[in-house]
Amino acid sequence: MRIEFIIATHKNVEHLKAMILCLKAQTNPNWIATIAMDGYNQEIDVYATSLLSPDDKITKHIVMDGPHGDWGHTPIQSAKGYAEEKLLCMTSDDNYYVPTFVDEMLKPFDDKRCALAYCNMVHNSYGYDLVNTEIARAKIDLGCFVTLTDFAKQIRLGKGYEDDYVFARDYANTFCSDGLYHTKKIFKVLYVHN
């Protein structure tokens, strides 16, 4: 089982390089990534294209018209349709992951009833302080949770600031409210929102 990361990127190739380094530093190699460019940027295009190879972990590079100015939600929503792995993590290029993120986030899915796993985070909007995450307004970010891809494709990611929370709420209400599936929180900081 692998996690497919969808990485929204727009104008700063250095942010994307840092994100790719975070992923390549993962202790668990069970991940791949799709780069979703929100508007054309030649420097990012050259870098992203250079990463594509059958032997590399970067499998797709999608360029959209734009920019949309919606925190990467439009390119992520579009790229979700191309996701192929069982698990999905939607993020932006200016976020960071600790080296054990993939390993820790895969563990809850050993339970076939887990539909969404999320971890604690450090967030720049809170002065880089700890956010004890929960599926609540201002308490969760797209990049700190992993979903089942087939389920995530059924929930629309809106364009507003709070739509990370709205997506997580709607996902959990749709797939985890009847007791067949559940969410799992990992009480570790594995993600930094920048």
Image (spheres, rainbow, N blue to C red):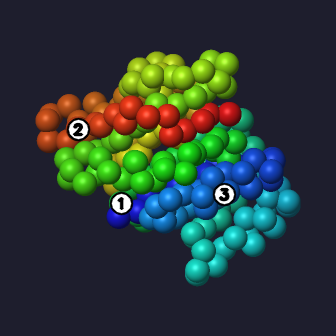
* Vertical order, 126 against 175 (above or below): above
- Residue 47 location, quadrant: bottom right
Amino acid type of disc 2? Answer: His
Local secondary structure at mark 3: helix
Amino acid type of disc 1? Answer: Lys
* Vertical order, 26 against 167 (above or below): below
Alpha carbon distance from label 3 to label 1 = 21 Å
In the displayed image of the protein, which residue is found farthest to the bottom?
A: 54
Looking at the picture, tell me which residue is in the foreground, 131 or 173. 131
Looking at the picture, tell me which residue is in the foreground, 165 or 19. 19
Residue bearing mark 3? 20
Upstream in sequence: badge 3 or badge 2: 3
Q: Residue at x 50, y 59 (%)?
A: 27
Image quadrant where one finds the N terminus: bottom left
User: Crowding at label 3, few (<14), some or many (≥20) Cα neighbours within 10 Å?
Assistant: many
Residue bearing mark 1? 86
Residue bearing mark 2? 182
Looking at the picture, tell me which residue is in the foreground, 63 or 102. 102
